[in-house]
Image: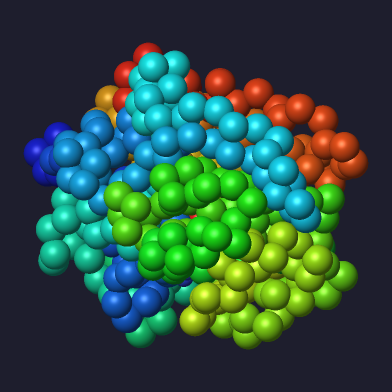
């Protein structure tokens, strides 16, 4: 159904994560009336690093955040791959500048909460509603409505479900999805960079923190990379485990559990891990891609649409692409939101599904001994959602 051109289209977004905020910012910049409904009492993000592939940095730049982003991000100088037990160098290759030359934007690391704050800065304060948990969604003639836990109902021309892996909007549209525990558990830690510097004489090779370092073993890996221009060291540790672990990122883990899980690994690496004062642990779960993302005037984006394993470090990047793409589609179909949403699904679902399936395949490959060469990622990093040609789908 066509929309009356006299007023701005109203868009209700459920979830103020990285995908929802990107969509809100890009839509607001295009003159849409946007309202965000976030379950949490306060906006924020967990303390963890985020790898921003060139495809995500292109979105940041297009939103006008490039300069501010450069102040909070880090670009590793080299990539170093070390053996888990003796620390022997497997690979050492230049990193800084190489990605920009090849893919048109840098591959950078940032603190999740810094990226979150930057995106939030583009959205009017009164458009963000916190303590607003969506519990139901209903498509209506020419629009859709959400119901919040406090009983309030909100009507909009379009509802976007950007409410993450356990999406209530997805469940309302398609029922509860099946998740499979992958027997992989992960920890996240952030340390002041000085801890790495202090450990210098225990490390197998000099590391000053400007590297993207991977310690690789047969049943696990540990990544070190810099955040905030090298002020912080982000550590991501993944390990095969028989013990089931929750999918929740915010479960604290005793440091002793982490050290036990990596018993026998290089003592210098363990020494750095031992400096953590807090660590968080979670289990990686896997879900199948969805066949549809849009029903009526309700659309999914981000993890709600394509919950993927973290193997390619692309979940947030693809969510940002979605957020930017849905704004472009709605702009193109300002007077025809149904055609705009059909175009969005047509453009985004195949790409996100392909990334989701490659993340699964790469995860499986990583378990093989020896692992085969990494799957190609040029098609992921080289993509430019900002400038991709877009044509509105004609509706019957
Ligand atoms: C271990 C790990 C490492 C990762 N590393 C990277 C990386 O380096 N690079 C990368 O690109 N990606 C990475 N990812 C993936 C990335 O974190 C996610 O894909 C990304 O956060 C998805 O963004 P989102 O906005 O879709 O969902 P989320 O960030 O989960 O946001 C959803 C929001 O919705 C809110 N919400 C939930 N339910 C409701 C409701 N009913 N009503 C209202 N609000 C609701 C939540 O509170 C939350 O704020 C990683 C993931 C994992 C697990």
Q: Which of the 4 image quarters holds residue 339?
A: top left
Identity of the residue furthest to the front in this view: 201
Residue 338 located left or right of residue 364: left
**Toward the viewer: 56 or 178?**
56
Q: Is residue 223 above or below residue 294?
A: below
Tell me the residue at 28%/38% (across/down).
Answer: 60
Asked whether the viewer can see residue 295, the reply is no
Q: How many marks?
A: 0
The N terminus: image quadrant: top left
Locate residue 370, reporting x and y percent: 87, 37
Tell me the residue at 70%/75% (across/down).
Answer: 259
Locate residue 89, reporting x and y percent: 68, 39
**Toward the viewer: 291 or 196?**
196
Tell me the residue at 39%/74% (across/down).
Answer: 39
Q: Which of the 4 image quarters holds residue 271?
A: bottom right
Tell me the residue at 63%/85% (across/down).
Answer: 254
Q: Is residue 227 above or below residue 108?
A: below
Identity of the residue furthest to the right in this view: 369
Locate residue 374, reporting x and y percent: 71, 30
Locate residue 316, reporting x and y percent: 47, 48
Residue 34 located left or right of residue 52: left
Asked whether the viewer can see residue 378, the reply is yes
Q: Is residue 377 above or below residue 1?
A: above
**Toward the viewer: 254 or 57?**
254
Q: Is residue 171 above or below residue 56?
A: below
Residue 125 located left or right of residue 327: left
Q: Which color scheme is applied?
A: rainbow
Identity of the residue furthest to the left in this view: 6
């Amino acid at each position: 159904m066509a929309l009356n051109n006299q007023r701005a289209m109203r868009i209700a977004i459920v979830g103020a994560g990285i995908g929802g905020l990107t969509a809100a910012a890009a839509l607001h910049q295009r003159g849409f009336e946007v309202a965000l409904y976030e379950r949490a009492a306060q906006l924020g993000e967990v303390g963890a690093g985020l790898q921003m592939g060139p495809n995500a940095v292109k979105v940041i730049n297009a939103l006008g955040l490039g300069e501010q982003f450069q102040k909070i991000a880090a670009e590793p100088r080299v990539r170093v791959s070390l053996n888990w037990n003796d620390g022997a160098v497997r690979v050492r290759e230049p990193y800084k500048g190489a990605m920009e030359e090849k893919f048109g934007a840098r591959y950078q690391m940032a603190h999740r909460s810094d990226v979150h704050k930057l995106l939030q800065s583009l959205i009017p304060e009164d458009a963000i509603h916190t303590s607003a948990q969506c519990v139901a969604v209903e498509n209506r003639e020419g629009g859709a409505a959400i119901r919040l836990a406090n009983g309030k109902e909100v009507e909009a021309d379009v509802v976007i479900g950007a409410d993450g892996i356990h999406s209530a909007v997805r469940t309302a549209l398609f029922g509860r999805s099946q998740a499979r525990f992958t027997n992989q558990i992960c920890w996240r830690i952030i340390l002041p960079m000085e801890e790495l510097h202090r450990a210098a004489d225990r490390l197998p090779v000099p590391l000053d923190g400007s590297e993207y370092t991977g310690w690789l073993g047969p049943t696990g890996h540990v990544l070190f990379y810099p955040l905030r221009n090298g002020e912080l060291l982000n550590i991501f540790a993944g390990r095969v485990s028989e013990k089931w672990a929750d999918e929740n990122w915010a479960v604290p883990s005793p440091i002793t559990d982490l050290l036990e899980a990596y018993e026998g690994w290089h003592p210098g690496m363990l020494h750095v891990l031992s400096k953590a004062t807090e660590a968080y642990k979670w289990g990686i779960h896997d879900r199948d891609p969805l066949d549809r993302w849009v029903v009526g005037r309700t659309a999914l984006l981000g993890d709600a649409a394509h919950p993927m394993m973290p193997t390619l470090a692309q979940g947030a990047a693809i969510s940002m692409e979605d957020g930017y793409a849905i704004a472009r589609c709605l702009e193109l179909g300002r007077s025809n939101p149904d055609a705009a949403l059909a175009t969005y699904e047509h453009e985004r679902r195949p790409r996100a599904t392909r990334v989701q399936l490659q993340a699964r395949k790469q995860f499986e490959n990583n378990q093989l001994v020896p692992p085969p060469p990494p799957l190609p990622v040029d098609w992921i990093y080289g993509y430019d959602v900002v400038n991709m040609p877009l044509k509105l789908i004609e509706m019957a």
